[in-house]
Image: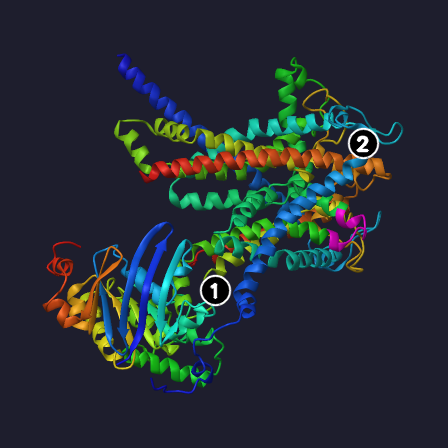
């Protein structure tokens, strides 16, 4: 009698566990579905031609757009990528191809450490180093964003290169090709999909960053005026507009959020497509 | 015929383990020399010392002299990269570059060394594939990926790739082990044909293959050169007891 | 050997002797040098960061010393006195709430992805969870202000107060944002990362172990319990990783927590402040050097805390993965 009860008890526990697991899955997915739905729903009326053509509205002005924010964000991301990608790539190459050096162990560890530092702290670093001398500027913001990019690109490049089999490298060396050419023409070329994926992911990451932008550039309402001046930023605008009391500003916040999510979605899909092939 | 290689007191280590002990031998030019011996005797390490590939592995060390055309390739001023253009290598498992076409695979050695002229490359690719007995099979598919061929074809592609840079020597490290008997036979025929113009050194664990294909045979055991001589003499009349034991299958 | 075609470059290929100079300066060495420089720049940046933060905090350190960490007054206007203890508390409490809510859910999600879901759905769900990780912080904040806060205020908090109002932390005025809301938003933000690590940990347990237990007649849940016990210390590592994320989060939390500097909030529904939030809000407003220095001091403390948390968590997770994989090989 008790044996059967015990068995039933175990079955009940099993069902409860299964229920809890699926419950947590649902709870975890509700926010993302809600966010996607709300962003789309609340930005539908804001997204029109004006949205893309006009610049940010002043206090009390009706309408307005985010054209200057798009320009500013593109400039900032590009500059950050120009600084961060080469350093990240070469570091990843070094960690993968010259892993016999003690330096690579140390760098690998601290690169991971760097990637865990809050972006606000990195922003404060850029503030201390650059803003206090040059002032609030695109350079300071790009510098902060580059620091965020570098560990990501380093890690993904290293992983991508490590997958390339030794036999390919040996085949190239046996042909009398110097080691550096082997790495560039054969190894990197073989892993190009995965390496590009890493770079795209890091761009998606910095496109959404606003904390470092806040402390290196602040809110900017106008167009690009030089690398030593601030510039508008899409992510920061979401913050500023959302916390404002103006309805049209809040609508612009949702519109900007829509653009940002679109960008992130695109890059996530592109990454999935790219990594479906070999390497 | 003059010796292509003169190997003097060659020793090799991998980390702290000594893999080759005092090898002394001469390798004849425009002939096929086979290196045989049980697993772990150092055959692969030996052949990789001939084109300075062994030292490319971290932890590897070499001492001694290897004279190639009279010049010690381990001399201080010699660039290993140059060595490898004169002494080519084909590996055990075919390793064509999968992200390149057949054409680009064969041309890889030239392209990476700065040869850009399309006409020259066309001629070289055709010539190398013909030398490797592969031209007829792939001449209409030169743009297909290098990895789309069968195992035996891939190996012949690797041979063509190695030949394209005009080496004087071709080292083949168990190049037929991963292939079926028919593909192996095709490559053995190819080896005999190439020996007319190139010096070939093959490593094989297949004694019958050594007997079929080579002019000279060297028997290695536990890193030492036990016996070396014309193939006919080694197989019919081995001088050393160990050689005879290996040939009759008592070990390895 | 006769050459069948003219490639001048190759004809001139004799084994060449290089001078010592030529041996030093060549493509390989330059390439290696560039690699070393790039890799070292990471170390340089990290070192420079620590230096600049200490440098910038120096005024504050001189003025307050260790009392900065224990001080409870933040008065830039009149007294010009700064103390970070309430901020530290705020960060700790919101992160703790995030872990209490987020970790069990993450374990559930990790189990779902690794043990319960069939392959086909698994990919789609994983994609959604990854998307969750990719959403920028400000958008969480935006959603938090306009959707989460009204929802919590109208449907959750009022009921919480009705049933549990006698407990002090559930009493007090409800405006929608505040400590609990901040913790909930942080929980949502750490779930993707933590559940990804959980999923990896659970998946690393070899199937042979599961099969052994099932062959003894265990239910699914009993099998899962074994899997969890396998990677127990890894779970701790994942939790600490999540803690690191929660501590460093800035924009989303400052948009919902209310940004009120006080030593102790009156309830979970009251507003509060965190280290990261105060830096974001006040650095641009800081008008004099000591103020700036105090904020940089906060950043220094935040950096220190994050570094400790991250190093600890990586060591633990790394060790556990090695252990489990080592067992799998046997």
Circle 2: is it few (<14), some (14-19), or many (20+) Cα within 10 Å? few
What colouring method underlies this structural image? rainbow
The residue identified by callout 2 is C62
Q: CA distance from mark 1 to mark 2?
A: 53 Å
Locate residue B116, reporting x and y percent: 49, 80
Circle 1 SS class: helix
Q: Is residue B173 visible?
A: yes
Circle 2 SS class: helix
Residue A132 part of the magenta segment? yes
Q: Nearer the viewer, residue A253 or B192?
A: B192
Image mark 1: chain: A
Circle 1: is it few (<14), some (14-19), or many (20+) Cα within 10 Å? many
- Looking at the image, the residue that sits furthest to the right is C78
Q: Nearer the viewer, residue C11 or A185?
A: C11
Residue B196 part of the magenta segment? no
Locate residue B247, reporting x and y percent: 13, 61
Does residue A199 lie above or below C312 as drawn?
below
The residue identified by callout 1 is A179
**Horizontal relation, residue C27 to residue B224: left or right:** right
Residues at marks 1 and 2 on the same chain: no
Image mark 2: chain: C
Q: Which residues are magenta?
A: A129-140
Q: Residue at x 49, y 59 (%)?
A: A193
**Horizontal relation, residue A156 to residue B23: left or right:** right
Locate residue C240, reporting x and y percent: 55, 32
Locate residue A57, reporting x and y percent: 80, 52
Q: Nearer the viewer, residue A33 or B239?
A: B239
Image quarter of the N terminus of chain B = bottom left
**Horizontal relation, residue A206 to residue C193: left or right:** right
- In the drawing, what numbered circle is on residue C161? none
**Horizontal relation, residue B225 to residue A249: left or right:** left
């Amino acid at each position: 009698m008790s044996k059967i009860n015990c068995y039933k008890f175990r079955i009940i526990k099993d069902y409860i566990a299964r229920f809890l697991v699926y419950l947590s899955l649902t709870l975890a997915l509700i926010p993302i579905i809600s966010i996607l739905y709300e962003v789309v729903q609340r930005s539908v009326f804001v997204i029109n031609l004006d949205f893309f053509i006009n610049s940010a509205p002043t206090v009390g002005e009706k309408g307005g757009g985010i054209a200057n924010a798009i320009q500013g964000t593109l400039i900032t991301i590009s500059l950050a990528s120009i600084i961060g990608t080469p350093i990240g790539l070469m570091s990843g190459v070094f960690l993968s191809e010259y892993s016999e050096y003690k330096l690579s162990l140390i760098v690998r560890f601290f690169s991971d450490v760097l990637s865990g530092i809050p972006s606000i702290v990195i922003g404060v670093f850029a503030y201390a180093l650059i803003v206090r001398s040059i002032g609030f500027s695109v350079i300071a913001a790009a510098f902060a964003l580059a620091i965020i990019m570098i560990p990501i690109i380093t890690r993904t490049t290293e992983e991508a290169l490590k997958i390339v089999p030794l036999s390919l490298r040996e085949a190239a060396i046996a042909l009398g090709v110097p080691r550096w050419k082997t790495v560039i023409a054969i190894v990197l070329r073989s892993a190009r999909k995965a390496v590009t994926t890493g770079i795209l992911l890091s761009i998606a990451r910095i496109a959404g960053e606003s904390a470092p932008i806040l402390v290196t550039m602040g809110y900017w309402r106008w167009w690009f005026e030089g690398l030593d001046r601030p510039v508008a930023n899409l992510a920061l605008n979401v913050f500023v507009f959302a916390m404002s009391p103006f309805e049209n500003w809040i609508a612009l916040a949702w519109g900007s959020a829509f653009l940002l999510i679109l960008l992130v979605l695109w890059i996530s899909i592109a990454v999935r497509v790219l990594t479906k092939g070999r390497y | 015929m003059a010796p292509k290689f003169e190997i003097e007191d060659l020793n090799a280590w991998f980390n702290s383990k000594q893999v080759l002990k005092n090898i002394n031998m001469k390798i004849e030019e425009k002939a096929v020399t086979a290196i045989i011996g049980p697993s772990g005797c150092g055959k692969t390490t030996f052949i990789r010392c001939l084109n300075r590939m062994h030292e490319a592995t971290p932890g590897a060390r070499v001492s001694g002299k290897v004279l190639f055309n009279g010049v010690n390739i381990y001399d201080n001023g010699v660039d290993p990269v140059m060595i490898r253009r004169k002494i080519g290598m084909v590996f055990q498992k075919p390793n064509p570059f999968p992200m390149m076409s057949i054409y680009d695979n064969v041309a890889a050695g030239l392209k990476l060394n700065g040869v850009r002229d399309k006409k020259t490359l066309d001629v070289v690719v055709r010539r190398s594939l013909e030398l490797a007995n592969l031209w007829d099979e792939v001449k209409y598919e030169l743009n297909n990926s290098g990895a789309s061929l069968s195992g035996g074809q891939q190996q012949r592609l690797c041979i063509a790739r190695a030949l394209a840079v005009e080496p004087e020597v071709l080292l083949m490290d168990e190049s037929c082990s991963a292939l079926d008997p028919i593909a192996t036979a095709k490559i053995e025929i190819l080896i005999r044909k190439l020996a007319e113009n190139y010096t070939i050194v093959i490593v094989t664990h297949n004694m019958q293959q050594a007997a079929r294909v080579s002019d000279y045979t060297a028997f290695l055991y536990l890193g030492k050169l036990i016996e070396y001589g014309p193939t006919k003499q080694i197989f019919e009349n081995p001088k050393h007891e160990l050689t005879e034991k290996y040939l009759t299958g008592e070990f390895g | 050997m006769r050459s069948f075609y003219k490639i001048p470059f190759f004809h001139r290929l004799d084994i060449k002797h290089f001078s010592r100079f030529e041996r030093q300066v060549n493509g390989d060495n330059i390439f290696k040098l560039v690699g070393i420089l790039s890799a070292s720049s990471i170390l340089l940046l990290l070192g420079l960061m620590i230096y600049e933060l200490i440098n910038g905090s120096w005024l504050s350190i001189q003025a307050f010393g260790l009392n900065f960490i224990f001080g409870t007054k933040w008065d830039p206007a009149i007294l010009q006195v700064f103390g970070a203890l309430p901020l530290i508390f705020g960060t700790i409490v919101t992160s703790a709430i995030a872990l209490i809510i987020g970790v069990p859910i993450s374990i559930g999600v990790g189990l779902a992805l690794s043990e319960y879901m069939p392959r086909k759905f698994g990919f789609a769900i994983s994609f959604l969870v990854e998307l969750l990780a990719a959403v920028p912080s400000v958008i969480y904040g935006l959603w938090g202000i306009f959707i989460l806060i009204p929802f919590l205020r109208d449907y959750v908090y009022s009921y919480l107060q009705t049933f549990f109002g006698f407990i002090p932390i559930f009493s007090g005025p409800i405006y929608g944002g505040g400590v609990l809301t901040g913790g909930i938003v942080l929980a949502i933000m750490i779930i993707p990362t933590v559940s990804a690590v959980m999923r990896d940990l659970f998946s690393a347990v070899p199937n042979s172990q599961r099969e052994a237990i099932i062959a003894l007649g265990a239910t699914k849940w009993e099998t899962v319990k074994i899997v969890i016990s396998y990677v127990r210390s890894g779970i701790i590592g994942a939790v600490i990783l999540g803690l690191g994320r929660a501590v460093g989060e800035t924009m989303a939390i400052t948009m919902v927590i209310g940004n009120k500097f006080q030593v102790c909030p009156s309830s979970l529904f009251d507003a509060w402040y965190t280290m990261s939030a105060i830096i974001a809000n006040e650095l641009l407003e800081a008008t004099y050097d000591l103020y700036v220095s105090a904020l940089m001091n906060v950043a220094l403390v935040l950096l220190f805390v994050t570094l400790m948390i991250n190093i600890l968590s990586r060591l633990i997770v790394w060790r556990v993965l090695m252990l489990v994989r080592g067992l799998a090989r046997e």
